[in-house]
Amino acid sequence: MTDAAENTTAHTRGGTDSAEEPAANGKPEESAAMSRYRRRLIAHRAADRVLSRPGALGTIRERLAVLDTAGDVYDLDGSADIYGNGVVEALEERTAALLGMEAAAFFPTGTMAQQVALRCWAARTGNPAVALHALSHPEVHERNAFSQVSGLRPVRLTGEARQPTADEVDGLPEPFGTLMLELPLREAGFVLPSWEELTALTDAARERDAVVHFDGARLWESATHLGRPVDEIASLADSVYVSYYKSLDAYGGAAIAGPRTLVEDVKTWRHRYGGQLFQQFPTALSALVGLERELPRLPEYVRHARVVAAALREGFAEAGVPWARVHPEVPHTQEFQVWLPYDVDVVAEAAVRQGEETGTLLFARAWDRGGPGLAVTEVEVRAAGLEWTAQDVRRAAEDFVERVRTVLGA
């Protein structure tokens, strides 16, 4: 199995893809991918310098340490939650306030959360059709859960690697009950519309008598590009889904926020879907910690991602790479794509060797096949990446290219 195949397994796209281990089915080619996956994980943990150290890749001891100071955000002498009270309710109230919504409901997974929200909207609008991008998470990574589990019918606005347009919403040749917008659209390169485009999209949906739902798995870090606070962004939608672990480093969890009457319905269906867990205080506490500590830092990560992206382009150019792309050129969030004109296995091996041999891991995520002779990966900038200057990035990019050439010549 090539690194592209590893990436397909790893990109059961939730948050930290490299935390997903490729399946081992006993085939020799799969063993090679498993070996590289393990080497990459070991290199990531041992590296002196990485652009991102997501908590999900830490040891159990490191992950438990997240709760060491949880008493700063919640009274640990209070009762533990039982079936959604206590700390879970506190998290729901905090989330609703941040998003400017009347109420919110906590879910163990985002896949469940969005199915439930959209199912509730379908019942209210009388239309199970959901207009969405063909590259959106439910279409690409949820094994047809909308139709197989929730009785919803996806209607695709476009398959192009960009956000949909208001004209495409207006011109959809059939009625739909809900417009779902993924902000940012990960598969297209974590891209966002402009504020004016987003406003036009939501207006177009309402002109079609549809409600608007934001798939805001990474909505928290979208404020910098859109130039508006999160609550103002959320105000354009009738309901919003947010994740706690993708950007905030919580153990897991998600929420649906919206009108109180909708959230009451959502909680009923949460129970029916098996999401009313007995106790969830570790996850809820870690989410509160993330809202307190990581949320305020996201704008800084986004700004530095733009420095890193520009330095990568310069480094590849100085190293004489015939064709290389950073997409978007100016990242919309702290995550973006890098495209290089090499075979997937070549760049994947070079990336791991750089971490093993230098203690600097420039590309920590898996590589995927972007087309004939093209490889693509995702780059994320977090707290660890703030220590990298533009010169550091350029040098690491040039060193990486040298290792690519070594692998090609081997």
Image: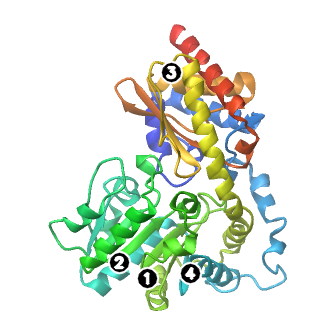
Q: Identify the residue at horizontal 45%, vertical 29% (top origin).
A: 2
First in sequence, mark 2 or 4: give its number.
4
Inter-mark Cα distance, 2 to 1: 9 Å
- Whether the residues at callouts 1 and 3 have beta carbons within 8 Å, the answer is no
Circle 2 residue: 119
Q: Earlier in the sequence, mark 2 or mark 1?
A: 2
Q: How far separated are the C-alphas under marks 3 and 4?
A: 47 Å
Cα distance in 3D space between marks 4 and 1: 23 Å
Q: Are marks 2 and 1 in contact (CB under 8 Å)?
A: yes
Neighbours of disc 3 within 10 Å: few (<14), some (14-19), many (20+): some
Type of the residue with mark 1 = Trp
- The quadrant of the rendering that contains the C terminus is top right
Q: CA distance from mark 2 to mark 3?
A: 44 Å
Q: Residues within 10 Å of mark 1 (few under 14, many from 20)?
A: many
Q: Nearer the viewer, mark 2 or mark 4?
A: 4
What amino acid type should be assigned to the residue bearing mark 2?
Arg
Q: Residue at x 37, y 74 (%)?
A: 212
Look at the numbered disc 3 and give the secondary structure of its residue: helix
Q: Which residue is mark 4?
A: 100
Q: Nearer the viewer, residue 184 or 126?
A: 184
Q: Name which of mark 3 and mark 4 comes first in the sequence.
A: 4
Residue 269: mark:
1
Q: Which residue is mark 3?
A: 346
Between tags 1 and 3, which lies in front?
3
Q: Few, some or many C-alpha atoms within 10 Å of disc 4 (few <14, some 14-19, many ≥20)? A: some
Count of marks, rendered view: 4
The residue depicted at 63 percent of the width and 38 percent of the height is: 308
Q: Is residue 85 above or below residue 6?
A: below
Q: Position of residue 114 (x, y in %)?
A: 43, 70
